[in-house]
Each structure stands twice: as C-alpha cells, then as structure tokens.
Image: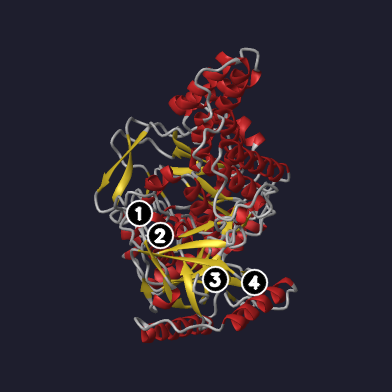
Amino acid sequence: MPAHNDQNTILVAEHEVHGIRTGVQAWLERRREVAGTRRRPQDKAMAVREATGASLMLDMGAAPDPDLVGRPSGQPLKPLIVLDRPYAPCASDVPDLKPLRLTELRMETHHRGFYLEARRISPVVSLTVRSWIIAQDEDGEVERLEVYLHTGVDDGNILESASGFFIKEPYLTINREGHTVLRIDHPTDLIAYEPHGEAYDDYPGPSRADSPNEDSAGTEDVILWLKGKGNAALKQRDLHSALTLYSNALATSSDSRGAVLSSLTNAILRNRAHVNLLTGRFEQAKMDALASLAAAPDEMDKHLNATAYFRAGCAAYRLRQFEEATRLFTELQRLTPDDTQADLYLLRIAMRLKEQATGLYGFGRLRSKYRGAAELVDAADYVVQTVVRHSAGKGRGCFAKHDLATGSVVICEKAFCVARPCCGQVRTALTYDTRDDQIRAFPVGLVKVLAEKLAKNPSCIAKIMELVGGRSKDTGMPVVDTFRLHDIVRYNAFAVPQSDGQSKEASTGLWRHAAMINHSCIPNIEPEFIGDLIIFRATRPIKAGEEVLHCYDATRDYNTRRTALKTTWDFECSCVLCMAESADDLEVRKRREELANKADDFVQRMSIPAKRLAIVKARRFMKAINATYHEGRYVGLPRTAAKAIEAWLAAAIA
C-alpha cells in the first residue's frame, strides 16, 4: 500500500507510545491471570443502569470515548485498536452447535462447538470502533456484549437491528477498561434475529403464541400481513426491517402445512430481491429473483418474470458476471421486446466485455466523468496481459505474458472494495499489533467496508482470503476472518490520491489482481487512478516473462524507505538500487538528503522561465548531488535525489 499522504500521517510522541505499550501489557497480564477461571455473575440492575447512563452521556456529547488517543501530542483524536491473539471465526452454523448458558462460561476461553442465545435488555452504547449492550440469557443471567469495529448492518447498528442474538462459540474476556465482556471480532460470529413470536406481536388476527396458524387460509393471511409490513418498511427506506419481514414471510410459507399460493411467494421473493439489490447482497438478490420465476407463465406472469430477470441481471452485472448478465437481459428482451432497459444494459455489457478483452477504455471520457476521489467507475478489468505465478523469494508475483511497450496499459482494474470519503467510510486508526509490537496508522475504514461486502456476498470470501497465502483452509461454511482482513489490507491495499483536495483523509482500496504485484525501488510500471479504477502503464519496454514491479514507497532517503518497507510490509528490499545505497557511507547519504532538500526548496521558489543565474545555481545543485553518488556502483541506476532539480532544469532550458 503506497504511503499515506500528510493528511493521514499520525504523529505519536515517544511518551505516548510508551504509555500505550505499558497500558496494553498491563491489560494482557490481567487477562492471563484470570484465564480459565469461572465467570463471575453480574448485577442485572446495575449493569442496565450503567449502559443506560453511558448511552445518555454519549448522546449529550458529555462522555469521552475510551478508545480515542492523541490529545497529549496535539494531534486530532484517533481510535486505538489492539490486535492481539488472533483467533479463527466459527465455521459452523447455529444448528450444528450445542447450547450454552452464561453460568457455564470461563474467562479467556473460546467455547468451541457451542453457541449462546441472549436478548438485548439495554440501550446500545455506540463508541467509535465498538458498540455494546447488556445481554440476558434465558436463565436471567446478564453480561456485556461488545462488537468490535464491524457493527454496521444496512446503514444501522447490528445491536439495534434486533432484540435477540445467537453468539457462536462465545469468547469471554476483559476489555481495556476492566469490564468482563462477551467479545465479537468476526461479523459472522453474531446472528441477529427477532425471538419467535415477537415478529407477530402486532398481528391483528388470532393469537400467535407459538406459531402461525396451521390452516392454509390463516397462513396466507399472516404472509400477506408480513408482506404488507415489508412493503411499508421498503417505502420508508427501512431496508433492514423490510428484509427481515420478507424473510419472515417466506419462512412462514415454507413452515406451513397447507398449500400457500406460489404467486404470493414469488411476489415476496421479487420484493426481497429488490431489497437485496439496494443493500448490496447481490448473490442473494440473483437467487431470489430467479427463484421467483413462474414455470408456466401466462401474460401477467410474463410481465412479472421480466421484472425478475431484470433484477437478476442487475445483480449479475454488479457481481461482474458479464456473460451471465448477458443471458439474463437477453431473456428479459425476449419477454418484453419493447422494453429499452434490456437494450441499454446489453449495450453496457458489450462495452465491459470489449474493455475486458482489449483494454480500450476511453480514458479521457472517464477522467472527465469521474473527478472525485475513489468514485465508483463503471468499467471492466483488463488483466489478460499478465499472469500470476511464483516469484523467487517473494511468493507470488505478476509476470508479462507478452512484450509490452513503454506507455502501454499493463493492468487496468476496478477496485474490489474501496473506502470512499463521500460515504463517510474513510477512517484511520492507530493499531497496536502485539504480534510484532508495532504501532501503525491503519485504514480501518477499508477493513469495515470490506468485511461488510464479504458478509453480504459470501462467494467472494475465498477469493479475498487467498491474498494472504498459506493460512487458508476450507471450513465448508463462508466466514469472515477479521484478523486476516487486517493483514490483507496491510499488505495489499493502495492509497488513492485525493483529486478533489477536500477530503481530510485519503481513500484506500483493494484490487485483487494488482495486489499480486511485487515491489521494486526501480519499477517498470507505475499506477494512476481514475476514481476506483487503477491503471498501470509500462515505464520502459517489458519482455514477455519478465516480472512487472511497482514502487510501494518512493521515499528517496534509504533509511526511511527501508524502515517503512519493513514496518508496513514486513520485508527488506534487495533491488540493485537498495544494494548500491546500502554501501554508501552514512555521512554521504546525510549530505545527499540535505542537498536534495535544498534543491526541492529551490524548485518550489523558482518559476519558469528562469533567469540565467537561477539556471547556473540549479546546475550547481545537480553537480553537488551527483557527486554523492559513487560512479561505479550507480551506473545505469536512477539518482532519485536529483530527480526534482533535473526536471526543473529540463523545463527551464527547453
């Protein structure tokens, strides 16, 4: 991931770093002391009062967020996230797990093979990087339930979306404030639901204490009532409630003993497909739409089938399944020849397939259309010029399949996921990773957006998780591993330049194919961005079979660059430029950097056209900087310290 710009830089004073480390180590020691001991019971009334008070104080803006740090150094407050003892998410569904009660829990234990069922009995306390409630099990025992980072669901908070929760393989620990908590790190470990019967509390028909009426007519009435409530929620843009109500209606239909009209079920499936499209659940949207198709349609059914094909086609297009989308929109065109929507989509798909095969995009048109940082570009991926295979000493890498000319497009790829300023998704935090004892500035906003997208489209999980190789295994169930997502973003994400100049923090994104490109301080490709489209062009001729390389960190100072590469990406560069610079005397490197800084200041002050004396001075800078480079070691190598003054001179004497 290219280095963040100055607006994303977080400066932490040495005493703050010491304070963070000391506090975290004390916290880890407290956890070690209680590991394996039985959970202590909590006072229910006191716990609820504490949650209610904390929620009210936050609403009034009168309570500090304990996760925020930074004020002593004068920096804006940033959240601190501690990455400690990574553990795998639960890979089983709730019916495959055994029930557990709060009284059976032990501290610092992942209760593998079990689940806990609990209900929310307090307001939700929403902090910057976590939310918590007081949860109660069926015995009346209570505990604090904390969800870390991945708290969102359909523009709301998952803890507010329902009153009941299944906690898969519950983990009981102590948080940094000393509270005993049920901690949720992986979004797929928490299942929100409405307890049985509560979804029907306001049903106007006969009592539904246990289950829907078993007679066909009664069941149909309930389904119609749930469908109507879902439609009303959709009209109010309460998408989460609409999705829940449509799902309850379908579950009621499948659980009934009587025959419910298939046309009603199909209508609900079409409606749910629409909501799934709006909430980014494209896989489920396609499944729902196709499941709603009438097998032997009459004229009315043909019109409804057309709607289903349209929604399925839109979902396939958003999943970038362009061939599948072609088939679905062709079916729509067959059913409704006069409908222009199918024609328009088929035209768009034809453009995507052409881009995918040829790399012809019309970049000028795209630049004029997508001016904001990380805007979502409607374009396909062009990756056919390269192939991913083993790279000696580097794991996997990208290699040219054909000879590539200078300036040619090597890779053009749309982001799999991007954190966008316009959507409030950009967020930088401090992370303290106890695995290597490093404190870093980290784009946690991208991790949140990425986790949400994967949770909503599970078939994508394996493709992303393989970006961190060597730790993947088939669990049989798609799960989102938060700790691996942190590593994936750390090693593979790109910072997106701010084109609008208005965003306070830089966007970041993840590109699956581009993530395979390895680093060199003497790259043969360089990136540019149009929205969330990354374009790599060759900076020199590249031979077939040659590895394509770009520069992760272009800092010209050798020591600074080496430290950044090691701290952020955990490797030491051994390219020929680094080998040459490593042989330089420390004083020589220091002198070179001083001269380069003076030359940079000169370039900033001197305008073009320039006076003769300015050109003479620039040439002296050039000569002095070049004198710091050993003539034998730097033959054919770039002299990065002279780059700025060299470019100024070329423009001044042109």
Label at residue 468: 1
Mark 3 falls on what kind of element?
Answer: strand
Of marks 2 and 3, which one's residue comes earlier in the chain?
3
Q: CA distance from mark 2 to mark 3?
A: 31 Å
Of marks 1 and 4, which one's residue comes earlier in the chain?
4
Where is residue 232, by image quadrant? top right
Crowding around mark 3 (Cα neighbors within 10 Å: few <14, some 14 to 19, many 20+) is many
Label at residue 590: none
Mark 4 falls on what kind of element?
Answer: loop
On the image, numbered disc 3 is attached to which residue? 135
Q: Find residue 137 and report its horizontal and vertical position in percent.
A: 50, 70
Crowding around mark 1 (Cα neighbors within 10 Å: few <14, some 14 to 19, many 20+) is some
Picture residue at 48% right of the left edge, 38% below the top: 413
- Callout 2 touching callout 4 (CB < 8 Å): no
Q: Find residue 168 and report its horizontal and vertical position in percent.
A: 42, 62
Please, which residue is most extreme toward the left here? Answer: 392
Query: Which of pointers 2 and 3 indicates the residue nearer the eye?
Result: 3
Mark 2 falls on what kind of element?
Answer: helix
User: Mark 4: which amino acid?
Assistant: Pro
On the image, numbered disc 2 is attached to which residue? 487
Of marks 2 and 1, which one's residue comes earlier in the chain?
1
Q: Find residue 349 and report its horizontal and vertical position in percent.
A: 53, 24
Crowding around mark 4 (Cα neighbors within 10 Å: few <14, some 14 to 19, many 20+) is few
